[in-house]
Amino acid sequence: MVLNILSSLILVDQKRRLIQIFHESLRRQWNKWELRGLVLISLALQIYLIYSGNRRKYIAKRKIRAFIWCAYLMADWIATVALGILVDRSSPYSGDSNNNQYGDLRLMAFWAPFLLLHLGGPDTITAYALVDNELWLRHLLGGVVQTLAAIYITLVSWDGTLLSFLTVPMFLCGIIKYGERTWVLNSADRKNLQDSFLAARHTAEVNYTKFMEEFSLKEAEGYRVTASQMEQGSSPRDYTLPISIHDGILQTANYFFETLKFKWLFVDLVLSFYERDMSRSFFQGLKYEDAFQVIECELGFAYDVLYTKAPIIYTPFGLFFRLFTSSVTLSVLVIFFVSIGLRSHNHEFVDVVITYVLLIGAILLDLYATLSLLFSDWAILWFSRYSSKLPSVNHSSDISLQSALKDKRWSHSMYQFGLLDFCLTQKSSLFYKISSFICFRKRLRNLWVKYWVSVRHLKHLKMSTDLPSFIFKHFHEKSTDPLFHLKILAPCPGTVALETHKNLDDLKWTVEVEFDHSILIWHIATDICYEGDNSKRLKDGNHGIKPEWDDHMHYSKHLADYMLYLLVDCPFMLPIGIGKIRFQDTCIQALAFLEEKNWASKAEAYESLGQVSRNYSPGTVKVSESVLFDACNLAAKLKNMDPNEMWKMVSGVWVEILGYAAGQCNGFDHAQQLHKGGELLTHVWLLMAHLGLTKHFKEESHGRVKLITT
């Protein structure tokens, strides 16, 4: 931020030199409208950001996120540059500070507090990504410099008029807004969040100083004193929640997020066995719809804490500041209208209109923020707590709660990426054919692969309700199985499904490999089998026949494409490996295979891949890190199985792979995806945590110590 102020002043000097090449009339118009345009653009960006800030929770499309990202970066930059221009024009050493070639400088100096307001940002977005919270100290230092710049502008332009005095209250509003944003960024920093959570931790530990005093006193009285450990129940049946799902989804989610401290998981803190058993006993009695709704609300609370001003605006101080800034801005607007109006002879008409636009815009931003505050999950929780004391609003609060549950809290979608489909599409692209004749073929291909994967080839799939139901059923069964242990999921995901269907000995080699290796093998094999069986299903569908394995086939396909998307586009959410290297080598080998013959159709290409590995065993053909032939061999083995049993087994393997990836990903990495519309992997991770299937809980707990006197 400090460098932004300095760079803006340098930019002003460079701009002056640049516009010297233009005609004098053009330079005059540029000087008059440059600052005006920047101020209006800054206000427009604030309006766009406050509108789109909360919508990031359920917007997964990259184009829309790109607009929000550009607006977020440009908002601070434009406001900083505008402040730099005001500093330059207000300087008494400026050669043109006393004439009107720039417009009405006295009125323009009144715009400085509004630029501070804009730098404070809207309530719905303080950080675009979690890394912005880590840079809170840089933001604080920039705020100090920008505040000093605004003070300098105010002091230099001070003339004792009413307009100068109106600058002071608006200046206070700007400092409050900027201070709020800096405080929220600081409080959402990972380390500070961990410290605040641990500082508020309520423990049932014994005061050992008092304990030893009591021990010595009892001994002095002649008693024989021994210390005994108080046992605490570990069965889920020993724990009952003081809340039920009938009390409301939001209330239940807030209880888990705040009271049972599941918010700790987002900063990689560990909970006790008590929270685990309380949560597990509750979630085992839920339907999948209620379970995922509770999780959605919890992730919504986490998003508000990490990316918005929720930590401060839902406090008494935050409400007071919001009321103060709104009332002050409204009062300044009224005084400005009464004293100056629209037809002032002391100020230029255009500058007066822009000032009205800034004042009305600030009021509208506060009004929108207030409405968002009243209809937020936090406000609905507050109203629901006090609705029992106000019978007249009880029914209306219930209606508000039901309508709130219909609001979107995540995208309910997931990205899909198919390796073979990508290779077939890439092979037919014009750019790929041209790059084959250029000497820098490998570099161009790598650039083309990166562009095609990240922009063109990713598909956005809306999830049906069947897939969450299937996932919930799987993990619910695992949490209720007394023989199931967490270690079964950890080393080789997919082992349980293969063992259940009695194929572990034959297919063990597909899961006892590195995790990214297993994903690629099963992805390609699933894709090949899906293409063949789906064609049969479509033919049978003409006669109204739906095969029994149809649902499991689609579950497998969707999860296979989703996991490959994570491997290629979000590798930080998966265990460390050489997944991208294997992916690139497999693509190269697949392209080489597809280039040998010009297949008449996609079905023929898939059919040929399904038959290519019938004459060799896994591992006999090894080309770099490619897994294409191993995957084709797996596909050939799967095709020899009964389709019904095969697809049930494959879907079981994929849901185990999904659960393993979710459990291995850090909570902070899950939190990074909340501003991108949310990930299915994050919802599965929190579901597994609630069912006690992750490593975020202490296995043992120390009971309380009591004295026994005899």
Image (cartoon, helix red, strand yellow):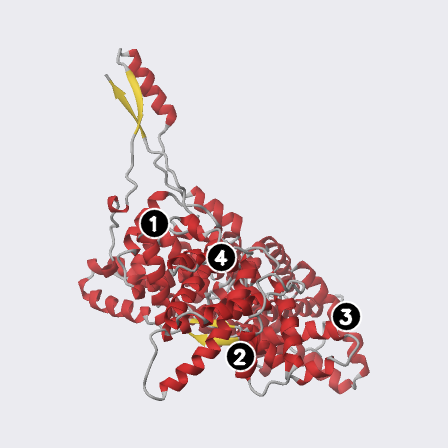
Q: Amino acid at mark 3?
A: Asp
Distance in Å between CA atoms under marks 2 and 1: 55 Å
Distance in Å between CA atoms under marks 3 and 2: 67 Å
Badge 3 crowding class, 10 Å Cα cut-off, few under 14, some 14 to 19, many 20 or more, is few
**Residue 113 can be seen in this image:** no
Give the secondary structure at mark 1.
helix
Closer to the eye: label 4 or 3: 4
Distance in Å between CA atoms under marks 2 and 4: 25 Å
Q: What is the number of the mark on residue 346? A: none
Lower sequence index among marks 2 and 4: 4
Residues at marks 1 and 3 touching, judged by CB atoms closer than 8 Å: no
Q: Quadrant of residue 475?
A: bottom left
- 581 over 334 or under it: above or below: above
Distance in Å between CA atoms under marks 4 and 3: 69 Å
Lower sequence index among marks 3 and 2: 3
- The residue at the point 35 percent across, 53 percent down is 691
Q: What is the number of the mark on residue 13? A: 3
Give the secondary structure at mark 4.
helix
Closer to the eye: label 1 or 3: 1
**Residue that mark 2 sits on:** 607
**Residue 418 can be seen in this image:** yes
Q: Amino acid at mark 1?
A: Thr
Residue 455 in picture, x, y percent from top left: 59, 76
Residue 345 in picture, x, y percent from top left: 59, 81
